[in-house]
Image (tube, rainbow, N blue to C red):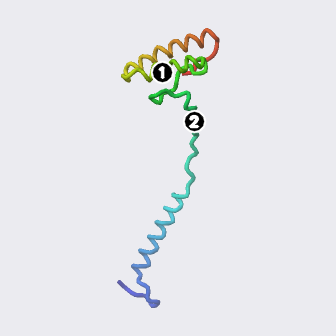
Amino acid sequence: MRLTKKGVSISAAVISASFLLGLGSFTAYAEEPAPKETVTTIDPARIDRDGKKICGFDLMSESEKGGYRNMLHQTKSLTDRDEIRVDHCARMRARAKERGVPADE
């Protein structure tokens, strides 16, 4: 370690400068704005017990929605609930086609 006339170590000055330059680039990187993400929220009423979107929700009456939820709630097996969903979506696609509206899946 060498001392200059002012009593500062040259190697310490080099290390300090390198450290500060490194922090400067880190700070610039840390200050870059994060990309904006579009957050879409789904009405919880449109989600079934497994967190899946209810197909054809807007095409169903309130009693149909309740019956569908009850059927899923009473079905114990995930495989059986998935079969119910597939059948339900097929019926909702047919209903949407009859009414001339886009199918909501």
Q: Residue at x 49, y 15 (%)?
A: 88
Task: Give how far across and how far down residue 21 sits, in percent.
Answer: 48, 68
Q: Quadrant of the C terminus?
A: top right
Seen from the viewer's position, the closer of residues 23 and 74 is 74
**Placement of 17 over or under 83, stated as above or below:** below
Q: Is residue 65 left or right of residue 71?
A: right
Callout 2: helix, strand or loop? loop
Q: Is residue 60 left or right of residue 15?
A: right
Q: Residue at x 52, y 23 (%)?
A: 54
Task: Give how far across and how far down residue 90 sits, in percent.
Answer: 50, 13
Task: Give how far across and how far down residue 56 sits, in percent.
Answer: 56, 19
Q: Is residue 96 left or right of residue 53?
A: right
Seen from the viewer's position, the closer of residues 10 and 77 is 77
Q: Quadrant of the N terminus?
A: bottom left
Q: Quarter of the image holding residue 64?
A: top right
Callout 1: helix, strand or loop? helix
Residue for badge 2: 41
**Placement of 16 over or under 67, stated as above or below:** below
Q: Which numbered tag is attached to residue 70? A: 1
Seen from the viewer's position, the closer of residues 5 and 16 is 16
Query: Are the two marked residues, 2 and 1, in contact with CB atoms closer than 8 angstroms?
Result: no
Q: Which numbered tag is attached to residue 21? A: none
Residue furthest out toward the right: 100
